[in-house]
Image: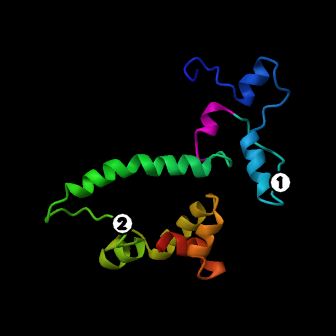
Amino acid sequence: MAIAGIVPVARWLANIKQRSDVVCRLCKRARREQHGASTQNLPEETYGRINSAFCDGMATTVTAAHHFIWRHPYANMQAAQTAVSKLRFVTPDSSMNTLWQEEEFEQICSRESLTEKAAEIEKTISVKEHERKHHDFDPTMFYENRFWN
């Protein structure tokens, strides 16, 4: 269906006169659930969009799938690591914070620059209530805490 371009998303359904609009239903639902978020100017619902983290309604699912897929090669790389290997991995025993302290990352960019960019990205990812409680040491620092810890 994807190759033929006939996935039943809003854009295709509008093309065959089965829908009157092309707005993304998943984004619309996600924004309604955000209590007060505007449902104006919604993007078109396309196959590519609903399979990306840009779709508000699919961002968490797509991100989880991405992380699930990467766990296998990540685990293999970690298992193949030798004593002289220079690769470092974030593990349950470490965090970005411990890696930053142990390595020479300041030579690449400042901690402040990385924190600022990470916060921009973190703000685009929807947060489940149990995650918020886990990371919310200081409500004004939530995104920084989630990234570094």
Helix, strand or loop at label 1? It is loop
- Image position, residue 134 (x, y; %): 56, 74
Between the residue at mark 1 and the residue at mark 2, the CA separation in whole angstroms equals: 37 Å
Q: Report the side of 116 relative to 31 (left or right).
A: left
Inspect the image, locate mark 1, and give the three-letter code of the amino acid beneath it: Ser
Seen at 52% across and 71% down, the residue is 115
* Span of residues in magenta: 46-53
Between discs 1 and 2, the one toward the N terminus: 1
Question: Residue 43: which quarter of the image?
Answer: top right
Residue at 50% of width from left, 69% of height from top? 147
- In the image, residue 5 sits, relative to residue 46, either above or below, namely above
Quarter that holds the N terminus: top right
Residue type of the residue flagged with mark 2 = Val
Q: Is residue 42 above or below residue 142?
A: above
Q: How is the model colour-coded?
A: rainbow
Q: Local crowd at mark 2 within 10 Å, few (<14), some, or many (≥20)?
A: few
Q: Nearer the viewer, residue 6 or 99?
A: 6
Numbered mark located on residue 90 in the image: 2
Rendered location of residue 110, percent (x, y):
44, 74
- Choose mark 1 or mark 2, whichever is in front: 2
Q: Residue at x 63, y 38 (%)?
A: 49
- Residue under label 1, please give it: 38
Foreground: 96 or 80? 80
State the residue lying farthest toward the bottom.
138
Residue sticking out furthest to the front: 130
Q: Is residue 33 left or right of residue 78?
A: right
On the image, the x and y values in percent for residue 9 come to 70, 29
